[in-house]
Image (tube, grey):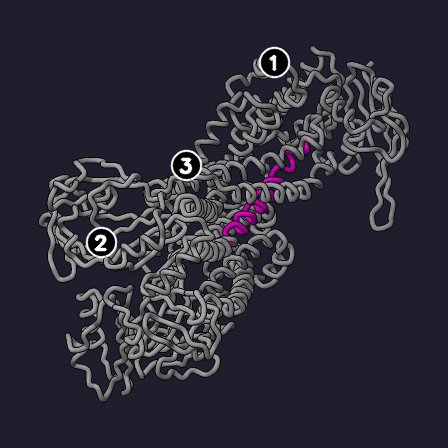
């Protein structure tokens, strides 16, 4: 009996469950794809970790690292290889012309590389005074392989074109092309490393496998943390990528939570429709002896078949799609990233979706139990809106299931808690908002025409169904709208800030002795700012080194001057001048970040081995969009002028003069790095564009699921109101008006959801603009408007098609004998 | 006022033609009360649907004041249904998401009009609620009304439209005998007091005997069963 009715009802009702099938498939696609990419990249890190970071353990810092200190000195030199290298920014010059190029120089030891190999043309083989350089380096300096170039006092031969370093992905983004040379050859340039922007590395290779135990690694890591040295372990992958991957996982997790939630809402809404369609059938079955349990088993099997098949299909497509996308990611990492096996994930996807659909259907199963023959066949009117409050308990498994799935993806319990709680809270907020809007409209409905009154009355009558669907669509829209609005504002402000206000050329790492000459070369628009690097130690008695916020414990660029800049304003206190001694002026937002600094507070910093204390005499605010260098801490000249400093300069000249300045400076002072601000903007905006595009693509499933939900709701609404439509027609309402009724109702719901999501997304973008980024310009994003309008057009067409048969349905169907 | 001229109705199913009835001709005078009786499946409701303009005959015509309603354009037919005829259904067919008040207002709302007209409509509806003893249920949704109350609302809805002809398709079919009698008495009192034409379908001879003319459909033919002089 169970098998017979399962197959029969499945054959009869499958078309009513198609939208459930699609929504599960979309959710499974996103889940399968996310798991696949995440696992593939994690596996890649595990398998290729050593090559990616350049060693089993890599330590890096802005100063030379002493291997005779701490746990490093305990390493047996017969069992490990310890390689040292450093990187520095410097300017090369063409011997035969005035062409120059700033480059990121990697000065390596004889053991380089410890893992992997350098890909170059011709094959990599570093010899004395030889360099390998990226193609862009050769293009900018107008040199060919085999030619000589100048670096400071040294002459270097270009041995080949550098294509790929084995640990290139862990080196991060650079604005200047890469060059590799031997560390011992760099000294011939006579460039003072202490005055240049340099980074030092210790790379450790285990020559005896597993020689460095876990506890030893922990000791080295602790030593590194204590001494503010960056620690990378091959078992985790490079820190920056791990952090980046973690951030992406977080965002994908949130989108996945929203999408899974929408899948559940789709399932519940669709099942409500199925229930109303098959209520009589079920009542008749019960009249002829079928038990509740049998009917629930039948529908469990039907839903199970749909869940497993849709889940498996979606997961399969997701894994296949992500495996296809891996080459794109791999091209960025310049490596081979292998995809995960398809079939295990496909099977798991089917099983997981089975659990999802059965959990979502708990209220449906309960409603099946509530159907009785008497209720239906005697045509007794009953209050359909009376719901027991305990029925809400049946929805509890849903957030639990979503949490479990999120944890499977991210393995981050904090993310899971925040995402699911955030989702529930925002959904509750949207539901409350929708409920009050509809209630308000219902109260004033008599002010409107018949069609609008009908729409409002219908929405109100459907009660929590309308509220849940509108709130779900708001949730679906909000995620993608927020990303879009924030991105738009970031890019607008960056382009405005950099293009309009920022000087076109910055100069970095100018030494004190070079200032006068640089001023002559750069011209009268040249402005310089002394920079001394140091760490924050104390604010009054509070030890700031114990802070868990890395943005407070890091090294800062500090400066000193006696004049206030044009874009700065004193918020409280008095600006120090040449007269005031031992003073410090602090940025207002930074003052808040470190716990609320007041006038008269003492701030102690650590600079080049010396503790320095000063008194806060002013709190200042600055226009961060002005393009001039911004400093959290500005000392009076007496405090820092005695310290060796490098200088940062800006030059505001027409574009055609920049090349000449760069060439002159490059020839005379190769340590000074010129950076054109347009290059920064194009690199940053390119990065932002790529990241946001990826995020938007990830967000598409949630929009798709919202769209499916609207389709489900439209179809259900039209089905439920079929007899009302006949009555309207019997009393003279034209078919066109009836079509307008349905279409306007759908448009009203989509608009309500869209407007709220649009307002929320821009409120968040505005808050981020004002309080986090301190951007001056706020702009409205048009992309969400296109999305809303497109959805309106699509659902209107759908409503038109679905309601056409109803408007043409014979009116005689209303009569007793048909 | 209503001329039914030689209408017939057939339908085709799997290549076979089935005739429900044929050669039906009736003249119905203004203010007349007519009952149509017949066994189940005889075509009573089909006949009503054709005369009420809900369905088209296979042959023949239905004229209201010399106008063939089945040759009207859709726009005119809609106006005809809104202004000239009203239908009371066995299953009440109230709009579930409208209150009782809004259901009664329905034909007037479809008609719309100026503010003055709307004010006048409200007073019409208010008086109907008084007449049907349903003023205390004005703001109730249909699901909370009893069967008798729903049918009274349905009657008020038809009367609110101000139509000349009322069609009632087994109006007491879903009600118990006591409630059904009350509803029928209410309907008949309105029809008599306002000189409406009533065409009523029933299988209950006791109800049919209260009409002016009883027609019987049997074996595809319509005949007068009895007539009150």
**Residue A586 sits above or below residue A255 on the image:** above
Instruction: Examine the structure image and report whether residue A713 is included in the region drawn in magenta.
Output: yes
Q: Which mark is residue A191?
A: none
User: Residue A382 placed where, x, y %?
Assistant: 52, 35
Assign a secondary structure to mark 3: helix
The residues bearing labels 1 and 2 have C-alpha atoms spaced at a distance of 69 Å
Q: Is residue A20 above or below residue A215?
A: above
Q: Quadrant of residue A103?
A: bottom left
Q: Is residue B143 visible?
A: yes
The tag on residue A552 is 2
Can residue A554 be seen from the camera position used here?
no
Q: Residue at x 18, y 70 (%)?
A: A223
Give the residue number, with chain letter if any, for mark 1. Answer: B115
> From the viewer's perspective, is the residue at label 2 or at label 3 nearer?
2
- Decide whether residue B225 is among the magenta residues: no
> Front-most of A377 and A754?
A754
| Residue A385 at x, y percent in the picture | 48, 36
The residue mark sitting in front, 1 or 2, is: 2
Helix or strand or loop: what does disc 1 sit on? Answer: helix
Q: Magenta segment range?
A: A701-727
Question: Which residue is the site of mark 3?
Answer: A432
* Distance Cα–Cα, label 2 vs label 3: 40 Å
Chain letter of the residue carrying label 1 = B
**Left or right of B173 on screen, residue A329:** left
**Callout 1 and callout 2 share a chain:** no
């Amino acid at each position: 009996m169970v098998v017979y009715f399962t197959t029969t009802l499945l054959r009869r009702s499958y078309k009513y469950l198609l939208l459930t099938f699609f929504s599960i498939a979309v959710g499974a696609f996103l889940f399968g794809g996310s798991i696949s990419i995440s696992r593939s990249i994690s596996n890649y890190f595990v398998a290729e970790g050593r090559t990616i970071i350049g060693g089993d353990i890599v330590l890096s810092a802005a100063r030379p690292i002493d291997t005779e200190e701490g746990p490093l000195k305990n390493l047996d030199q017969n069992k490990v290889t310890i390689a040292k290298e450093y990187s520095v920014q410097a300017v090369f010059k063409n011997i035969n012309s005035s062409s120059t190029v700033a480059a990121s120089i990697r000065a390596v030891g004889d053991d380089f590389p410890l893992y992997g190999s350098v890909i170059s043309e011709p094959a990599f083989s570093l010899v004395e005074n030889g360099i390998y350089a990226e193609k862009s380096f050769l293009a900018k300096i107008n040199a060919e392989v085999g030619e000589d170039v100048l670096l400071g006092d040294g002459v270097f031969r270009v041995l080949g074109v550098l294509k790929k370093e084995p640990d290139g992905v862990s080196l991060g983004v650079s604005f200047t092309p890469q060059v590799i040379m031997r560390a011992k050859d760099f000294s011939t340039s006579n460039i003072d490393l202490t005055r240049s922007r340099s980074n030092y590395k210790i790379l450790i290779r285990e020559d005896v496998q597993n020689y460095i135990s876990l506890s030893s690694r922990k000791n080295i890591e602790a030593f590194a943390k204590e001494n503010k040295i960056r620690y990378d372990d091959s078992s985790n992958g490079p820190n920056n990528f791990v952090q980046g991957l973690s951030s992406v996982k977080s965002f994908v997790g949130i989108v996945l939570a929203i999408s899974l939630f929408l899948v559940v809402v789709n399932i519940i809404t669709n099942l409500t429709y199925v229930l109303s369609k098959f209520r009589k059938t079920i009542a008749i079955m019960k009249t002829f002896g079928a038990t509740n349990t049998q009917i629930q088993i039948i529908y469990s099997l039907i839903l199970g078949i749909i869940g497993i098949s849709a889940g498996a299909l979606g997961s399969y497509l997701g894994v296949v799609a992500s495996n296809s996308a891996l080459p794109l990611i791999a091209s960025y990492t310049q490596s081979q990233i292998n995809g995960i096996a398809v079939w295990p994930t496909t099977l798991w996807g089917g099983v997981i979706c089975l659990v999802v659909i059965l959990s979502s259907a708990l209220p449906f199963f309960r409603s099946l139990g509530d159907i009785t023959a008497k209720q239906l066949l005697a045509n007794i009117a009953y209050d359909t809106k009376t719901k027991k409050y305990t029925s809400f308990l049946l929805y509890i498994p849903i957030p639990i299931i979503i949490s479990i799935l999120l944890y499977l993806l991210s393995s981050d319990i904090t993310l899971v808690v925040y995402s699911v709680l955030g989702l529930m809270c925002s959904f509750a907020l949207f539901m409350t908002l929708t409920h009050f809007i509809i209630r308000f409209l219902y109260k004033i409905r008599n002010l409107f025409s018949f069609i609008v009154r009908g729409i409002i009355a219908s929405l109100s009558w459907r009660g929590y169904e309308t509220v849940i669907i509108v709130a779900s669509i708001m949730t679906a829209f909000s995620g993608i709208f927020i990303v879009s609005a924030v991105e738009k504002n970031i890019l607008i402000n960056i382009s405005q800030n950099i293009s309009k206000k920022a000087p076109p050329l910055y100069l970095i790492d100018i030494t004190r002795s070079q200032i006068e000459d640089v001023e002559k070369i750069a011209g009268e628009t040249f402005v310089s700012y002394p920079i001394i690097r140091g760490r924050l130690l104390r604010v009054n008695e509070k030890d700031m080194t114990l802070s868990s916020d890395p943005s407070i414990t890091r090294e800062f660029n500090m400066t000193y001057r006696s004049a206030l800049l044009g874009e700065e304003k004193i918020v409280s206190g008095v600006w120090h001048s040449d007269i005031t001694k031992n003073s410090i002026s602090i940025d207002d937002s930074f003052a808040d970040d470190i716990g609320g600094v007041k006038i008269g507070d003492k701030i102690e910093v650590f600079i080049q081995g010396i503790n320095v204390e000063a008194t806060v005499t002013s709190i200042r605010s600055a226009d961060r969009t002005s393009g001039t260098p911004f400093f959290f801490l500005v000392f009076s000249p007496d405090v820092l002028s005695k310290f060796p400093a490098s200088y940062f300069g800006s030059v505001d000249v027409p574009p055609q003069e920049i090349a000449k300045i760069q060439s002159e400076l490059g020839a005379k002072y190769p340590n000074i790095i010129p950076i054109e601000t347009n290059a920064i903007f194009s690199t940053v905006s390119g990065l932002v564009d790529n990241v946001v595009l990826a995020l938007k693509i990830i967000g598409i499933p949630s929009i798709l699921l919202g769209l499916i939900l609207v389709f489900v709701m439209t179809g259900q609404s039209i089905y439920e109101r079929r007899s009302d439509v006949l009555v309207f027609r019997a009393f003279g309402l034209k078919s066109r008006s009836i079509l307008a009724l349905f279409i306007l109702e759908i448009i009203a719901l989509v608009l309500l959801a869209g407007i709220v999501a649009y307002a929320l997304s821009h409120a968040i973008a505005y808050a981020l603009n004002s309080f986090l980024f301190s951007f001056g310009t706020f702009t409205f994003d048009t992309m969400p408007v296109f999305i809303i309008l497109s959805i309106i057009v699509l659902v209107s067409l759908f409503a038109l098609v679905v309601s056409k048969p109803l408007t043409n349905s014979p009116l005689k169907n209303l009569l007793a004998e048909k | 006022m209503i001329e039914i001229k030689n209408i017939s109705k057939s339908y085709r199913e799997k290549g076979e033609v089935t005739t429900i009835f044929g050669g039906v001709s009736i003249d119905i005078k203004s203010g007349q009360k007519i009952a149509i009786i017949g066994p189940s499946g005889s075509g009573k409701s089909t006949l009503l649907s054709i005369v009420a303009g809900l369905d088209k005959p296979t042959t023949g015509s239905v004229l209201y004041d010399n106008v063939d309603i089945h040759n009207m354009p859709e726009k005119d037919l809609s106006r005809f249904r809104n202004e000239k005829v009203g239908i009371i259904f066995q299953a009440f067919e109230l709009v579930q998401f409208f209150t009782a008040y809004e259901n009664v207002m329905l034909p007037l709302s479809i008609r719309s009009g100026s503010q003055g007209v709307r004010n006048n409509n409200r007073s019409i509806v208010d008086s109907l609620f008084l007449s049907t003893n349903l003023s205390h249920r004005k703001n109730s949704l249909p699901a909370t009304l009893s069967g008798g109350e729903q049918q009274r609302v349905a009657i008020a809805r038809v009367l609110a439209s101000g139509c000349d002809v009322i069609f009632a398709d087994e109006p007491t079919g879903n009600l118990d005998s006591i409630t059904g009698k009350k509803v029928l008495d209410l309907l008949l009192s309105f029809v008599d007091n306002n000189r409406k034409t009533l065409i009523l379908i029933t299988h209950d001879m006791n109800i049919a005997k209260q009409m002016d003319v009883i027609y019987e459909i049997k074996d595809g033919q319509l005949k007068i069963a009895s007539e009150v002089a």
